Amino acid sequence: MLKGIPKILSPGLLQVLAEMGHGDELVIADGNFPAASVARRLVRADGHGVPELLEAILQLFPLDSFVERPAALMAVVQTPGEPAPPEPPIWARYREIVRRHEPSFGGFELVERFAFYDRARAAYAVLATGEGALYANIILKKGVIPG
């Protein structure tokens, strides 16, 4: 046991977070995301939801302050001819969590579904969760800790 590290963060996830460098991306994937088929490095957190993992990760993980949008969400697919779908409720929770840890956070980048998959393939790691909410995937770009 270590002091000050959230218990939800497994040793494998802590290793990945420590290995990541400035600009590397971590995908926190919901239960429907094809994590195993797209991940270069796969970390499993089955049985856990994205909000509690996001909360724990952001206690240790700085977001990149050199880019306008250091966190990205998978945009909701819009059916042609239909009105724009509402924002998924879980996004408000993400916004609140990120702003608590990064007060200057300016909002999420929205990434089209297939572009999101491509970006996930290039990410440093994918964290597969048991999150059941739809459109609950998030990409975090790692920043630096000022020396």
Image (cartoon, rainbow, N blue to C red):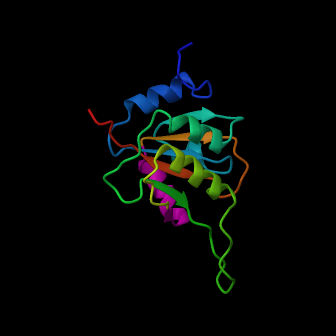
**Residue 55 in magenta?**
no
Magenta span: 109-123
Left or right, 21 with respect to 83, comes to left
Q: Residue drawn at (30%, 52%), measured in percent from left and top? A: 66
Q: Residue drawn at (52%, 50%), measured in percent from left and top? A: 99
Left or right, 70 with respect to 13, comes to left
When asked about the image quadrant of residue 91, the answer is bottom right
Circle count: 0
Front-lying residue, 37 or 30 = 30
Query: Measured from the top left, where is residue 49 in percent x and y?
Result: 68, 41
Query: Measured from the top left, where is residue 23 in percent x and y?
Result: 34, 46
Residue with the most extreme left position: 147
Residue with the most extreme bottom position: 81
Whether 10 is drawn above or below 110: the answer is above
Query: Measured from the top left, where is residue 21 in percent x and y?
Result: 33, 37
When asked about the image quadrant of residue 48, the answer is top right
Front-lying residue, 32 or 132 = 132
Front-lying residue, 37 or 22 = 22
Query: Measured from the top left, where is residue 129 in percent x and y?
Result: 64, 40
Whether 8 is drawn above or below 137: the answer is above
Front-lying residue, 122 or 94 = 94
Left or right, 98 with respect to 93, comes to left
Q: Main secondary structure of the magenta part?
A: helix
**Residue 111 in magenta?**
yes
In which quadrant of the rendered image does the C terminus lie? top left
Q: Residue drawn at (44%, 37%), measured in percent from left and top? A: 61
In which quadrant of the rendered image does the N terminus lie? top right
Whether 4 is drawn above or below 95: the answer is above
